[in-house]
Amino acid sequence: MDEGKTYVPWTPTIAGKEIYVADFIPVKDNVKTSKNIVIWPIDKHKTTPAIIIYKNHSGVRTDLIRESDYQKNFYLHGRVYLVLRTIEDDLCLFTLNRSDHLVRIICKLSPYEESGYKCPIVINSQIPGIIFANIKTYRGDSKTVISFDNGKHFEPIKLNLQPSESSKKDCYVELILECKEDLITNFYPEKWVVTFNGMYHCGVSSNHHLFISFNGGRSWRIFHAFSEGFSVLNHGGLILGRQFPEDKLWYSYDEGNNFYDVLNDDVFKIIPLESKNHLVISAINLNEDNNMYSIFNYNFSNIISAFCLTVDRTCQRDDYESWYVPRYYENCFYGKEVSYLKKKPFAMCFDNRTEVLPNIKPCQCVREGFQWYKNLVIIV
């Protein structure tokens, strides 16, 4: 404690009993989630198991979760989430309540891929309490469910479909929940915009699509043509997509209700260059006949002016509408109603806000709006 100047004998104990230390295991940087919880990931045999050690508020008991049971931990919005395998060999998502007890949220989770590419759980890093989970189905594949109240209730992904498609039975969505660190860049480009690649399982057929929600996950749309190279700019006011396999570049100013194409073909890479006053992207084209690469810059703020037949127009107050964070019980969650100003889909203007701040109001507390820990698990 004084940089090695003096040493004090120490005997480790678990539940008041002395333990024998056979070996010290080198650990990575510990993750301190609160004064009562410490997570130690172990770097052992080129794998990433871990031991999770936590104490209750009295500081008397220390519990250990076996490293073989540990799959993944998340620390978001002041909460700890753990993916653990139970003694029934069931993969489940847990959290810790205020007494630092494990609480089971949902089980029957789909397994991790060995490569670490797909996760059974993704938690919205922009908005507290929204959880995506892939659960196993009777057909052997996975089905995505979403919770808007931190796991108290889960519901399947709801699609906005054409009348001819909505009559189909036994259909569900499996979003590809990737194990990535930068969740905002990959999945949540804005508070209200969520984008995932995934599979649409319907009967005996399964097709890969791009799924996008413009209302925080409450409802979703399928974009058949765009499976990759999709970007959301200007707080959702501009979306760009590279059509595959034609490699055409398309853009939309109204959340995908209307798309317009850029004349240049063979676009295989788009690079957003967004700034406060400009919407510029660079597109890299490939001419396969002479194996020549070209770079084109497109200023989409000028295109907005062309549509409006005016000079560049910055969004005004009437161009915005209030968007409320979706919750299971109306818009109230833990006694708070949170909303953001969002540009109206058909407002042709440039949103130059550098930051979108929430508007938080108190709302009536109801029983359905709070977490009740009926799935309490105490490790002894």
Image: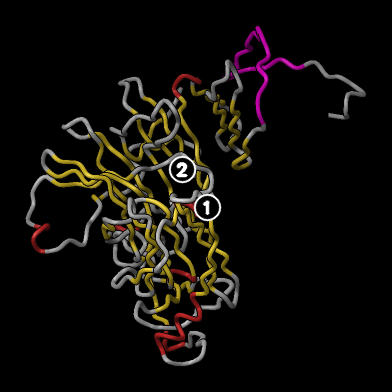
Q: What colouring does the structure picture have?
A: secondary structure
Q: Main secondary structure of the magenta part?
A: loop
Up the image or down, 135 lies above or below 14; here it is below
> Over which residues does the magenta segment extend?
10-28
Residue at image mark 2: 97
Up the image or down, 4 lies above or below 220; here it is above
Residue drawn at (41%, 56%), measured in percent from left and top?
Answer: 266
Judge from the rendering whether residue 212 lies leftward or rightward of residue 354; answer left or right. Answer: left
Q: Measuring from the top left, give residue 76's x and y in whole percent.
A: 52, 48
Q: Is residue 335 visible?
A: no
Residue at image mark 1: 292
Task: Answer with mark 1 or mark 2, whichever residue precedes in sequence.
Answer: 2
Q: Residue 16 versus residue 101: which sits nearer the camera?
A: 101
Q: Is residue 43 magenta?
A: no
Residue, far right: 5
Q: Measuring from the top left, give residue 254's x and y in whole percent.
A: 35, 74
Q: Residue 334 versus residue 235: which sits nearer the camera?
A: 235
Residue 276 picture quarter: bottom right
Q: Measuring from the top left, give residue 164's x and y in whole percent.
A: 8, 60
Judge from the rendering whether residue 127 lies leftward or rightward of residue 207; answer left or right. Answer: right
Q: Residues within 10 Å of mark 1 (few under 14, many from 20)?
A: few
Q: Which of the two marks, 1 or 2, is nearer to us in this view? A: 1
Quadrant containing the N terminus is: top right
Q: Measuring from the top left, give residue 32's x and y in whole percent.
A: 63, 39
In three-dimensional space, the C-alpha distance between marks 1 and 2, rounded to whole angstroms, equals: 59 Å
Residue drawn at (28%, 37%), measured in percent from left and top?
Answer: 135
Q: Amino acid at mark 2?
A: Asn
Is the C-beta separation of discs 1 and 2 under 8 Å? Answer: no
Residue, far bottom: 310
Residue drawn at (39%, 71%), measured in percent from left and top?
Answer: 363
Up the image or down, 165 lies above or below 200; here it is below
Q: Amino acid at mark 1?
A: Met
